[in-house]
Image (spheres, rainbow, N blue to C red):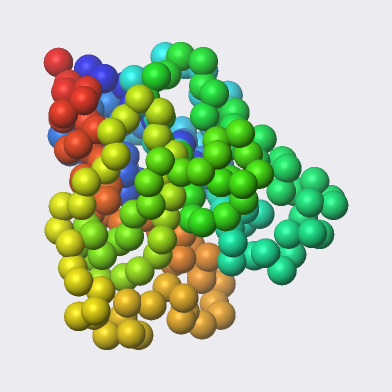
C-alpha cells in the first residue's frame, strides 16, 4: 500500500480521491476534516510529519501572504516577516527528506519570484478538468509529470459571471474557504495520473 500525504487540506477532496482508488492517503491540517470521516485526517502541524517516508506529497499551503491578489499588502507583510515565514513553510514541504514525488499547489504569487522553488512546472485552470470556473493555479512538481487536462471546457462558452464566480464572491465569513476550495475534477486527475500510473497500489 502506497502512503500519500495531502498536506494543508481540511476539505478531504484530494485525500478522498486517492482513497477511492485504493491508496492509503492521509490529510493533515490545523483544522478538522470536512471530508469522508472514514478516511484518516491528522489535525495538527504538517511539519511534524513531513519527513516521514511518504511515497507522494501533495500540498495546498495557505496563500494568504503569497497570492498576487494581495500585492497591495506585500510591503507590510515583507516588513513584519509574514511573507517570508509563509515562503519558508512551503520550502520546508518542498524539501521533505524522505519523499521523491511532491506537488505544491498555489495561485499566482510570490512563490515563483521570491522562493527557492522558482517558476511553477505548469499552470492549470479548473475549466480544463470539467469545472465551469477560472482560477489560474500553479503546480510545482518534483518527480511527477505535468498534469494533463481530462475534461476541457472552452472558457469562451461559459457566461462571465459563472466563469468568474470565485472573483465575484461578495464579503462573507466563509469567502476565503470558498475561494480556496480545491476542485474534484483536478483531484481525480491527480489520483489517476500520479497515483494509478506512477504509484499504483500493490
In the image, what residue occupies the spot 34% across and 20% down?
A: 55
Q: In this orientation, which residue lies closer to the viewer: 8 or 75?
A: 75
In the image, what residue occupies the spot 40% across and 41% down?
A: 121
Occupied quadrant, residue 68: bottom right
Against 102, is 108 above or below?
below
Against 34, is 41 above or below?
above
- Using residue 76 as the reference point, say whether residue 154 is left or right of it: left
In the image, what residue occupies the spot 17% across and 62% down?
A: 152
- Using residue 74 as the reference point, say whether residue 6 is left or right of it: left
Against 14, is 42 above or below?
above
Q: In this orientation, which residue lies closer to the viewer: 100 or 35?
A: 100
Q: Position of residue 86 (x, y in %)?
A: 66, 43
Quarter of the N terminus within the rendering: top left
Can residue 76 be seen at all in this image of the molecule? yes
Q: Position of residue 144 (x, y in %)?
A: 32, 30
In the image, what residue occupies the spot 14% across and 15% down?
A: 202
Against 151, is 141 above or below?
above
Q: How many marks?
A: 0
Q: Position of residue 94 (x, y in %)?
A: 52, 29
Occupied quadrant, residue 37: top left
Amino acid at each position: 500500500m502506497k502512503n500519500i500525504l495531502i498536506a494543508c487540506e481540511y476539505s478531504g477532496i484530494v485525500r478522498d480521491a486517492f482513497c477511492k482508488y485504493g491508496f492509503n492517503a492521509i490529510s493533515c491540517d490545523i483544522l478538522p476534516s470536512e471530508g469522508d470521516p472514514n478516511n484518516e485526517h491528522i489535525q495538527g502541524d504538517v511539519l511534524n510529519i513531513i519527513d516521514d517516508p511518504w511515497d507522494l506529497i501533495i500540498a495546498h499551503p495557505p496563500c494568504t501572504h503569497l497570492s498576487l491578489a494581495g500585492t497591495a499588502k506585500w510591503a507590510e507583510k515583507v516588513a513584519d516577516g509574514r511573507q517570508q515565514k509563509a515562503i519558508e513553510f512551503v520550502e520546508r514541504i518542498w524539501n521533505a527528506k524522505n519523499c521523491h514525488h511532491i506537488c505544491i499547489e498555489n495561485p499566482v504569487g510570490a512563490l515563483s519570484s521570491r522562493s527557492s522553488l522558482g517558476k511553477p512546472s505548469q499552470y492549470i485552470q479548473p475549466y480544463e478538468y470539467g469545472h465551469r470556473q477560472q482560477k489560474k493555479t500553479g503546480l510545482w512538481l518534483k518527480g511527477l509529470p505535468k498534469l494533463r487536462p481530462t475534461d476541457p471546457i472552452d472558457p469562451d462558452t461559459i457566461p462571465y459571471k459563472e466563469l468568474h464566480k470565485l472573483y465575484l464572491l461578495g464579503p462573507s465569513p466563509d469567502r476565503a474557504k470558498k475561494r480556496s476550495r480545491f476542485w474534484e475534477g483536478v483531484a481525480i486527475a491527480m489520483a489517476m495520473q500520479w497515483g494509478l500510473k506512477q504509484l499504483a497500489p500493490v
